Image (cartoon, helix red, strand yellow):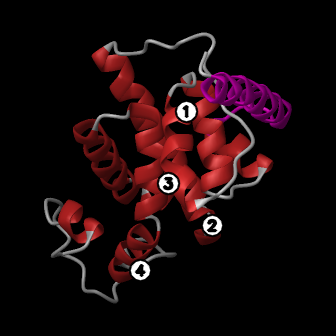
Amino acid sequence: MSIGTKVLRFYNLSKYRADESINEKINKTEFIELIEANKLPLYRLAKGIVKNEHDIQDAVNESILKAFENLGKLKNRECFKPWLMRILVNECYALLKRQKKVKLEENMTIYDLYYEENNQHELMDEIDKLELEFRTVLILFYYEDMSIKSISEVLNISQGTIKSRLSRAKAKLKVILDESEGGV
């Protein structure tokens, strides 16, 4: 059973036939397919923000439900992924706020992202040490391959701020990686 189907089984979709539109842009089957196509990016983004597996599942599931409930607000089908990511970011932040778990470490950061199979987990461990604002931007830019403009729209902050956060995050990661290699 797919993630979209699992989450939506709790929501009364039986009133829609598979080919019937939920709104004028997307029908039930298309919605589930879009969720399936985006489940890994959703998971990675949530993991980068909330970290705890239970919280990740809660945030992703709640975001899918909110997306379904607010599908009528989606103006353009091509904007589905950034729109869904924005919902997830908001849900993750709300979850952190509710749990009062926001403990950002001032000097944690990220470095030049390279994709060597054996270094991916170590790199993600270093990324997890970053402040939330840096972690989120890096995951969206490097792992989800989103443009500066798209990230700006998803996070509702200026493109200049996104560029600045990316630059600062890479510089901080370089320091962390240099320290870990030097045994400091």
Image coords of residue 124 (percent x, y):
52, 42
Q: Label 4: which residue?
A: 30
Q: Earlier in the sequence, mark 4 or mark 3?
A: 4
Q: Residue at x 34, y 28 (%)?
A: 95
Which portion, as a residue range, is magenta? Answer: 155-182
**Label ID, residue 126:** 1
**Residue 125 relative to residue 140: left or right:** left
Q: Earlier in the sequence, mark 1 or mark 4?
A: 4
Magenta span contains residue 158: yes
How far apart are the alpha carbons under marks 4 and 2?
14 Å
Provide the major secondary structure of the magenta segment.
helix
User: How many residues crowd around disc 2 within 10 Å: few (fewer than 14), some, or many (20 or more)?
Assistant: few
Q: Label 2: which residue?
A: 76
Q: Earlier in the sequence, mark 2 or mark 3?
A: 2
**Residue 29 relative to residue 137: left or right:** left
- Numbered disc total: 4
How far apart are the alpha carbons under marks 1 and 2?
36 Å
